[in-house]
Amino acid sequence: MAETIVALASGVGRAGVAVIRLSGPSVRFGLETIAGSVPQPRRAALRRLKDPGNGEVLDEALVLFFPGPASFTGEDVAELQVHGGRAIIAGVIAALTALPGFRLAERGEFTRRAVANGRMDLTSAEGIASLVEAETSSQRRQALRQAGGALERAAMAWRQRLAGLLALMEAEIDFPDEEDVPALFHSVRSGAEALLAEIEMALRGARSGERLREGAVMVIAGPPNAGKSTLLNALARRDVAIVSPIAGTTRDTLEVHLDLGGYPVTLIDTAGLRETNDVVEAIGVERARASLDRADLVIWLEAGDARADPPELPAPLLRVLTKQDDSQDPPPHTLPAGFELGLSARSGAGMPALLERLEQAARKALESGETALVTRERHRRELETVTAHLATVRAADEATPVEFVAEDLRLAVRAIGRLTGRVDIDEIYDVIFREFCIGK
Ligand SMILES: Nc1nc2c(ncn2[C@@H]2O[C@H](COP(=O)(O)OP(=O)(O)OP(=O)(O)O)[C@@H](O)[C@H]2O)c(=O)[nH]1
Ligand SMILES: [K+]
Ligand SMILES: [Mg+2]
């Protein structure tokens, strides 16, 4: 019999309320033992929790019972809302795990059981993980869509259409009819073509979908002493990087995470770019160049005494002149040619305009990620497998053995099965009984 699992579902540390969650076949028994009785389903009930070992009162708690299968995990589930002190939490969890058939849950085990019991597929489970991790509002919106089954539903529909095409090919394998072959190939090819177009469209949003989970990357680069670290500190509103009048102060790349208008951004400070004989500084310059390669935006910073033309880069570049301490908001026409913004990190002049530009850039890089179906490299890999097999099917002609086309379709179905974590029992039967003859 499956074990009943117990875990603290809320955050670790002192809090007003802590939630302890239970799931499994012995939940009713657990509630009877520790809370005296099982409350009405889905109704909060105030109960005195007692340690069955010595009868000691552990806490007064709100107890909720969710009978399976219409629960989060599909099993009987209970939630105990206790006072959030360490000793209370430890005492309740110890009393529960001492009961026969109970143990502590492993990481992600509640969601894992939900997937195993068909309450959700793997992509929706990943959405739940992303919801817990979401740090900005755009990440939250993306995760909500995913946890709500956006990719799950799309994948199920694709799978069904693939299975339909596969059934056509298998009928031809089982009951060959030479005359039907051209028409059959025509409908399978056009079915594959339509599916391919849809999945490729979903894959086109993958980059921004994955990017939104990780955040846009913005790199502050420029010659030594341009004021790069000062700007990083001003944007981060804390003293992250060392600032000094000595050129070559920053030798490593430094990252801070920002929320710009609801979009997650990783801002990177780099070593000033110059030729140097200092071994450590040279490594820093190398790292600075490497980070430019993964940037969504490069903030190229220069100052009156520190000027250098930016290198050719694949990423968009925002050329900024800093140390404009004397003007309130440096008007663009006073800037030397090529500069888009002037500012003073010291006085704060021009900073609102810079922030607005950075927000715009973040929105541009990430906006479409909110509605992207593909949000993880894992999704992209499996769907690329599907499109590769569909491309083979599309290229098939009457000379292609029917079995080959069927095999490509089967492998495509299997990749969708890995994506959703739902491998249909029929699919396994198909593979096993394919070897049998009709009538056996
Ligand atoms: N007046 C003025 N000085 C600034 C401003 N920003 C930076 N500085 C000064 O310029 C010097 C260099 O600043 P940093 O932030 O260390 O410059 P950096 O580009 O990070 O330098 P490296 O890391 O050595 O490449 C320091 O003395 C700063 O105080 C500014 O807006 N106005
Ligand atoms: K410096
Ligand atoms: Mg620096």
Image: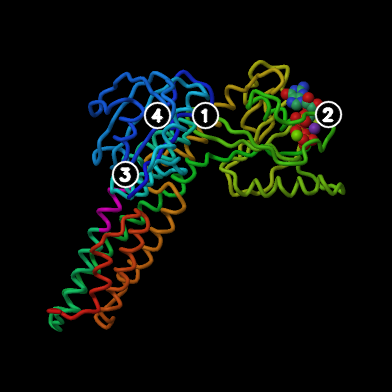
The image shows residue 269 at horizontal and vertical percentages of 69, 37
Coloring applied to the structure: rainbow
Q: Which residues are magenta?
A: 151-159
How many numbered markers are drawn? Answer: 4
Above or below — where is 229 with respect to 365?
A: above
Quadrant location of the C terminus in the rendered image = bottom left
Could you tell me residue 418's position as x and y percent?
A: 37, 58
Nearer-the-camera pick, 161 or 362: 161
Which tag, 3 or 4, sits closer to the chain's start?
A: 4
Residue occupied by mark 3: 150
Q: Amino acid at mark 3?
A: Ala
Are the residues flagged by discs 3 and 1 in contact, CB closer than 8 Å? no
Element marked by disc 1: loop
Q: Which mark is residue 12?
A: 1
Q: Is residue 205 magenta?
A: no
On the question of residue 306 being in view, the answer is no
- 17 left or right of 176 in image: right
Tell me which corner region of the image, top left, top right, bottom left or bottom right, holds residue 28: top left
Ligand 3 within 8 angstroms of badge 3 C-beta: no
Q: For ligand 1, tell me if the residue under mark 2 lies within 8 Å.
A: yes
Q: Check residue 157 for magenta coloring.
A: yes
Instruction: Examine the residues drawn in magenta and state their main secondary structure.
Output: helix
Q: Quadrant of ligand 2?
A: top right
Residue name at image x 49 percent, y 20 percent? 15
Q: Secondary structure at mark 2?
A: loop
First reached walking from the N terminus: tag 2 or tag 3: 3
Q: How much space separates mark 2 and mark 3, taking CA atoms?
A: 53 Å
Residue 57 rendering spot, x and y as whole percentages: 42, 20
Give the residue pinned by disc 4.
52
